[in-house]
Structure formats: C-alpha cells, structure tokens
Amino acid sequence: MRIFLNDDAHDVEPGTLAAALEALGYGGRKIATAVNGRFVAAPARPVTALTDGDRVEVVAPMQGG
Amino acid sequence: MSFYGVELKSRLLLGTSRYPSPAILAEAIKASAAEVVTVSLRRESGSDRAGQSFWSLVRSLGVRVLPNTAGCHSVKEAVTTAHMARELFDTTWIKLEVIGDSDTLQPDVFGLVEAARILSEDGFEVFPYTTEDLVVADRLVEAGCRVLMPWGAPIGSARGLNNVYGLKSLRAHFPEIPLVVDAGLGVPSHAAAAMELGYDAVLLNTAVAEAGDPVAMARAFALAVEAGRTAYLAQPLEPRDMAAPSTPVIGKAALGD
C-alpha cells in the first residue's frame, strides 16, 4: 500500500505505524508521530494500523527560538 | 524566580536557532548561563540524523528545555504540536505560539487563548507568546497560564521594547505572575530596559545567534539582564521634566556681580 510520510510517497507492506517506521529507517530514533493530523503516542504505534493513502508526520528535535 | 514551581537562578532564556555552528551554540549557552533553552520540532527523513545529534548536544549541556509551537497558525496545529513536543522532550512545559500574521509574526491572541485552555486542561504548563494586551493576558491567566510572555517587538526584528507603556501596565496588573519579554530584543540595553521595568526574565535568540560573535554577545546579554534586575531592585528614579541640581547650591561662593 502507499502512504505519504512527510509528504513523500512510500510503498510499504500493510501493517502498523511502528512497522512502517521501522521499514523506513526510523527504528530506535527520537521522534514523534501523527497520522492524518492526529498525534499518535509512541506506545500506540504498534497498535495503530495504517491504511492506503494515510498521511504520516514524523518529527524530531530541532533548533528553535 | 520560578516557573510552574521550578526555581531558576538565571533570568535569561535563550533560543537555540540560527547559530553558525553547533559548537558556537553550545559555547553561547554556557556564556549566557541560561538554564532554560527553547527548542522545536521539525520533520526528519529516515536518513537524516540532524535532529538526533542536536538533541544529544542539548542533553550534554544539562539545561532544561522549553519546546515551542513555532510556525503554527491554527489551534489544532498548535495543540497537536504541543502533544508531539511533550512526548519528544518529556516535559509538560510548552512555549505556545499561534501566529496570526505572517509579516509581523504577531500572535493570534484568540487562537492563543483557546489553545492555552485546551492544553492547560490537559496538564500542560503553558508559556504563551502573547502581546502586551491586558485583556488577553487576563484571559490567558483564566485559561490556566501561570507565566506570560509578551513580545517586546516582532520576532527577529531587533527593535527592542515597542510599547514600554503597555509592558509597564502589564507588570502593574500582574504583580504575582512571572512575566518574560519574549522576542524582538536586539542589543543588551533592550534586555536591561525590560528588567528595569520589573520583568522577571527575557527570552531571546536571534540577537545572540546572528551577532558577529555570538558567544561574546551571550555574555553581554547575561550582564545586561543582571544589571537591569539589580537596578530594578535598587528602585530607579522616575524621569522628570525639569533639572534637579545634583550639586548642593547652599554654600556656593558668591562670585557674581
């Protein structure tokens, strides 16, 4: 299925948010996530199923003022 | 001084953005003696490690972080960003920005109050980036904010305190709420002026980060904040219209015609 992660299209195996993140290189990283504009806490990633066309946001710490 | 029960010695809060290098950022934070630094969160790709290395640097400095919702233009965006920040940085503190105008980065105070209420009810400790408007400040306190952060001038403008009267009024109306001038400061004298008004602290970023020598400027701001605070406690004179001779007139030699 195709998901959009930070606006980029990715083809991933049907499954959970945690599995998609692992497959796309985010394993073990300090990140926060949202799916279709809704925050998904880290403990919920393994039980959050993705569906075709979902929009996933992945953010990390960044400099700020 | 304390924010939400956390005692702090330094009255200077420093942003972490726009420094020439991570090493200069680290040195500037040390030179400023800041105990709180602002951070943000942005998209990161699977191959990019910039965020991870930035976080390692901040952690190595042993400072407390105040995550922001910079760039958010709606309540929903700001609230979702705050939730992501709480998990990412493991803190209930949030510098809440809801921007209403792209040119001045002026806060959307209506959205700000709404987002502050939602987040406060959800256990966040909100540091709202606001204007000096008294009624908005009242609403923010009603919404649960126990710190207020009015702007000095638009973010990054280096204009200093645009509305000294408004900032003085805010201080007088909220003697018990920690007040932080956030944004718009350009030079250390601006920070000293804010502290002389009785403000509890200042928050700045660009004035240090984009100075020719950010480390020296960080030190200069730290000195100015300390000077301004000391002056406030020493009860400065009120300005007056006419001269008042400092040298006593009585006993002056009669040398005229």
Image (cartoon, coloured by chain):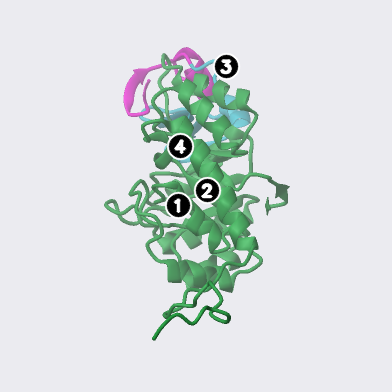
Chain colours: A cyan, B green
Q: Work out which residue is located at the far bottom of the displayed protein and give it.
A: B257
Nearer the viewer's eye, disc 3 or disc 1?
A: 1
Query: Can residue B179 be found in the magenta stretch?
Result: no
Mark-to-mark CA distance, 2 and 3:
43 Å
Q: Which residue is mark 1?
A: B189
Q: Is residue B204 left or right of residue B195?
A: left
Mark-to-mark CA distance, 1 and 4:
12 Å
The magenta span reads A1-25
Q: SS of the residue at dot 1?
A: helix
Q: What amino acid type should be assigned to the residue bearing mark 3?
A: Gly
Q: Which residue is mark 4?
A: B217
Q: Which residue is mark 3?
A: A28
Q: SS of the residue at dot 4?
A: helix
Q: What amino acid type should be assigned to the residue bearing mark 2?
A: Ala
Q: Which residue is mark 2?
A: B224
Q: Are marks 4 and 3 on the same chain?
A: no
